Amino acid sequence: MKQYIIEYGLKLLLLLLPFGAFSQWENGQIAVNFSLPEVALVDIEPDVNNRIHFTLSPASQSGRPPELAESTNETLWINYSSSLPGHQNSRSITAQISQGTIPQGISLYLEAGSYSGNGRGKPGQPAGKIELSSQPRPVISGIGNCFTGDGIANGHKLVFSIEISDYTNLATAGDTNFILLYTLTDN
């Protein structure tokens, strides 16, 4: 009987030994690589017609100044996406007149509103009202890793205003066209 118990005990041990050997925990490693390229994109919305128009009409009565039919325009929005390299803290958006000139005696101003929309990250802060010229002027600064969302009501509303700055230099002119260039720059 003893031999019978020993024999069954050995058979049971031999039967369970492989399961014990295969139930051990093993560790493995894999290398994971993640890459996010640097991104700096800027866009003016709406895409269809992002022109602004101002009309200076002659005075309606003698002794009165010329009249600005519409002295402000609030129809455009600026959208942007920014992914910064590790060593860089922020970006800015500048604006400048890249083609054409503003007629003498006229001043054109631009002011970006506060951020609004459905983007994420760290959007920039408006620089306040700036006078546009052929030199780049900051419009929005402190842009971090972010995206503003696309389209109208995302990003920053752009408010353009025009003033007659010097009546002595104001001359009769036909239509005057010029192009504004927006640049997302590294700080």
Image (tube, rainbow, N blue to C red):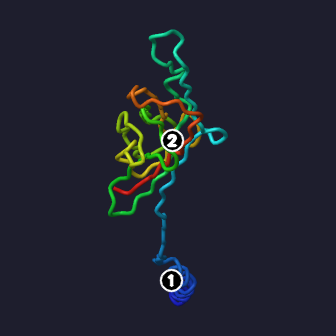
Rate crowding at label 1 as few (under 14), some (14 to 19) or many (20 or more) other CA atoms within 10 Å: few
Which sits in the foreground, 113 or 161? 161
Camera-nearest residue between 34 and 17: 34
**Residue of label 2:** 78
SS state under label 1: helix
Q: CA distance from mark 2 to mark 1?
A: 65 Å
> What is the residue that sits farthest to the right in this orientation?
48
Quarter residue 132 falls in: top left
Judged from the image, the secondary structure of the residue bearing numbered disc 2 is strand
For image coordinates 45% across by 17% down, the residue present is: 65
In front of the other: label 2 or label 1? Answer: 2
Q: Which residue is at the front of the view, 97 or 79? A: 97
Q: Quadrant of the N terminus?
A: bottom right
- What's the residue at 58%, 31% (across, down)? 53
Q: Amino acid at mark 1?
A: Ala
39 to the left or right of 152: left
Q: Position of residue 71 (x, y in %)?
A: 49, 24
